[in-house]
Image (tube, rainbow, N blue to C red):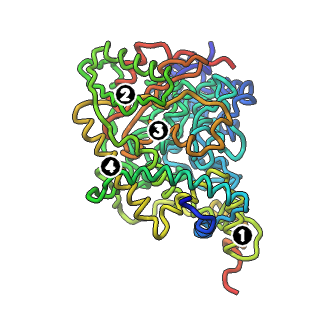
């Protein structure tokens, strides 16, 4: 049996039936990492010893208490922007380097309480700023489907680790598509919940009005299981919602009869890859054939979303990253006085994309430009949110591509930041409006690279998003395809 | 050009970032292209549109003010670049 290829729900069934142990599963995952990570480079830090210890504890719990979380004993990888007490957390930045968090993120505590086995921390674009994982200060991650290609970003390490069977599932964060776009690039499932559904406490902040934690998994059922474990109010995050967490598992009945799926013409533009467009249109037909009703909707402000996003996100980032001053933690340079210490520490610690975004964010917030850029963008953001409110009067979910192209070649866009930003064109609107959205595999291009289908839902309606995704997944085999490594 | 070298220097100082001359000229060109792209927003009349503040309802910002964590000085100081006893040691601020 190929243990590492198991989903959470399959592995959990086998663990309960005592066909396998968590220690076996965890060892198999580390063997797989040892055999493949020289090529993929998905991990920054591995937690071998603590993982085996946790797996032993899980095996003991499985013997004494069979009514346990489906995550008990499951090896999970976590993006390296989640604080993990006693386990180095770098955010893929030289500035944080060997930072040792004094506390755990709330989502890490929830995973641990559910009995999941944290196996290591995955690579990302520095401070989660990027769409290719190339902006990691340490090394780029390679796409398991083709090692010359990017895995997407910023949660590129988590997506690649899931695709390469280096873990059973992973966690990422999504500020402008950072879970969904890498999920699409690597042929796995990635879910960004509604803003406020999952606690952000202990996530290294990038753009606080959009950051959200979510799962990267091998199928839709696993995404539902992980969301159930992560979601809920947290007193330590004032933006986390007190709404009850539904049982997402019961949404997975394959039933979409009468469901209204919205198709926006703005998401099918001339510049997009023809095969991506074809695969997404085929997927829409498939969902229609299962009994859903297609509704044409308009999202007229979509073309302004990239400009709005890169003003709002960089403005928030420039203030969030002001804390990295080299005084209490992180890199501190030797300099003549305090101001120079700040300036040189930050120059030496931050990479080029982070600097670019801090500069852009500082500019749009600076005296004389605040109204013209920041406030203007926040007004257009209201228009984008209204676009969705209007569209959701006529449909239950919106179906779209996740990205305009499949994974591009490593190095292809690194010299052109604006081109890189445009690869987020279909994902950022959900962050600007705070909506839940999932990406799942819907085909391959001519080079054998995976294509992602995106399903966007109403606020806090992850149930319908998951139900639609599951119905499509049940009708196809794409999620069963594996890269050869 | 929307952006001069001087304004890039001013922004870098505000952001407490030292930039080398090469970085400065590269970033000036890049930011200029990005800001030109953002001019797209000026196509829209937003005079009567409210500014977006937050996306979700039932925010639960208030809670009882009581200590729930256990401060651990050693854990908190474990990452400090320069330490003196239980203090963060920082460069001299006042001459």
Chain where mark 1 sits: B
Dots 3, 4 in contact, CB < 8 A: no
The residue labelled by disc 4 is: B56
The residue labelled by disc 2 is: A399
Question: Marks 4 and 2, Cα distance to the nearest angstrom?
Answer: 22 Å
Q: Crowding at label 4, few (<14), some or many (≥20) Cα neighbours within 10 Å?
A: some
Question: Marks 3 and 1, Cα distance to the nearest angstrom?
Answer: 46 Å
Mark 1 vs 4, N-terminal side = 4
- Give the label, 3 or 2, closer to the camera: 3
Q: Is residue A413 shown left or right of residue B20?
A: left
Q: Is residue A245 shown left or right of residue A211?
A: left
Dots 3, 1 in contact, CB < 8 A: no
- Give the label, 4 or 2, closer to the camera: 2
Quadrant in the picture for the N terminus of chain A: top right
- Give the label, 1 or 2, closer to the camera: 2
User: Observer-nearest residue: A258 or B78?
Assistant: A258
Question: Marks 3 and 2, Cα distance to the nearest angstrom?
Answer: 14 Å
The residue labelled by disc 3 is: A425
Residue in the image at 29% along x and 57% along y: B50
Residue in the image at 57% along x and 55% along y: B31
Q: Is mark 1 on a helix, strand or loop?
A: strand
Give the image location of residue A425, x and y in percent. Answer: 46, 38
Q: Crowding at label 2, few (<14), some or many (≥20) Cα neighbours within 10 Å?
A: many
The reply to whether residue A138 is in sight is: yes
User: Observer-nearest residue: A347 or A266?
Assistant: A266
Asked if badges 3 and 2 are on one and the same chain, I answer yes
Q: Which mark is residue B33?
A: none
Give the image location of residue A211, x and y in percent. Answer: 47, 47
Residue in the image at 40% along x and 41% along y: A303
């Amino acid at each position: 049996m190929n243990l590492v290829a198991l989903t959470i729900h399959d592995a959990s069934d086998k663990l309960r039936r005592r066909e396998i142990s968590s220690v076996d599963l965890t060892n198999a995952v580390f063997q797989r990492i040892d055999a493949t990570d020289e090529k993929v480079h998905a991990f920054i830090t591995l937690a071998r010893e603590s993982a085996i210890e946790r797996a032993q504890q899980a095996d003991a719990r499985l013997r004494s208490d069979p009514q346990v979380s489906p995550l008990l004993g499951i090896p999970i990888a976590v993006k390296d922007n989640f604080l993990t007490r006693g386990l180095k957390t770098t955010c893929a930045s030289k500035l944080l380097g060997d930072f040792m968090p004094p506390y755990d993120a709330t989502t890490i505590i929830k995973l641990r309480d559910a009995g999941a086995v944290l196996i290591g921390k995955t690579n990302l674009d520095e401070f989660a700023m990027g769409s290719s994982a190339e902006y990691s200060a340490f090394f780029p991650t390679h796409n398991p489907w083709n090692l010359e290609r990017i895995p997407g970003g910023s949660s590129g390490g988590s997506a690649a680790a899931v695709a390469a069977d280096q873990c059973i599932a992973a966690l990422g964060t999504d500020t402008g598509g950072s879970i969904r776009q890498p999920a699409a690039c690597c042929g796995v499932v990635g879910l960004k919940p509604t803003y406020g559904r999952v606690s952000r406490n202990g996530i290294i902040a990038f753009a606080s009005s959009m950051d959200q934690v979510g799962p990267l998994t091998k199928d839709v059922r696993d995404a539902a299981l992980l969301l159930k474990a992560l979601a809920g109010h947290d007193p330590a995050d004032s933006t986390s919602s007190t709404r009850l967490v539904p049982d997402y598992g019961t949404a997975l009945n394959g039933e979409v009869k009468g469901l209204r799926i919205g198709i926006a013409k703005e998401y099918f533009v001339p510049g997009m890859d023809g095969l991506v467009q074809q695969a997404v249109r085929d997927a829409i037909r498939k969902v229609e054939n299962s009994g859903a009703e297609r509704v044409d909707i308009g999202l007229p402000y979509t073309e302004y979303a990239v400009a709005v996003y890169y003003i709002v996100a960089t403005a928030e980032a420039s203030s969030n990253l002001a804390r990295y001053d080299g005084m209490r933690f992180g890199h501190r340079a030797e300099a003549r006085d305090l101001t120079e210490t700040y300036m040189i520490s930050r120059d030496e610690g931050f990479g080029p994309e982070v600097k670019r975004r801090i500069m852009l964010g500082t500019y749009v917030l600076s005296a004389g430009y605040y109204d013209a850029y920041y406030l203007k963008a926040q007004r257009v953001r209201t228009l984008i949110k209204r676009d969705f409110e209007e569209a959701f009067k006529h449909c239950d979910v919106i179906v779209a591509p996740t990205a305009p192209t499949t994974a591009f070649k490593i190095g292809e866009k690194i010299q052109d930041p604006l081109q890189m930003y445009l690869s987020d064109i279909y994902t950022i609107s959900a962050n600007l409006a705070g909506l839940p959205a999932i990406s799942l595999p819907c085909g391959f291009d001519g080079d054998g690279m995976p294509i992602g289908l995106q399903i966007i839902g109403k606020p806090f309606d992850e149930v319908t998003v998951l139900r639609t995704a599951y119905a499509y997944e049940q009708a196809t085999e794409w999620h069963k395809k594996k890269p050869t490594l | 050009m929307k952006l001069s070298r001087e304004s890039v220097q001013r922004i870098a100082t505000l952001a407490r970032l030292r930039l080398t001359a090469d970085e400065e000229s590269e970033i000036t060109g890049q930011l200029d292209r990005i800001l030109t792209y953002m001019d797209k927003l000026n196509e829209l009349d937003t005079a009567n549109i409210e500014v977006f503040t937050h996306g979700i309802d039932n925010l639960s910002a208030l809670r009882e003010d009581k200590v729930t964590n256990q401060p651990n000085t050693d854990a908190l100081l474990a990452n400090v670049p320069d330490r003196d006893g239980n203090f963060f040691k920082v460069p001299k601020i006042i001459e």
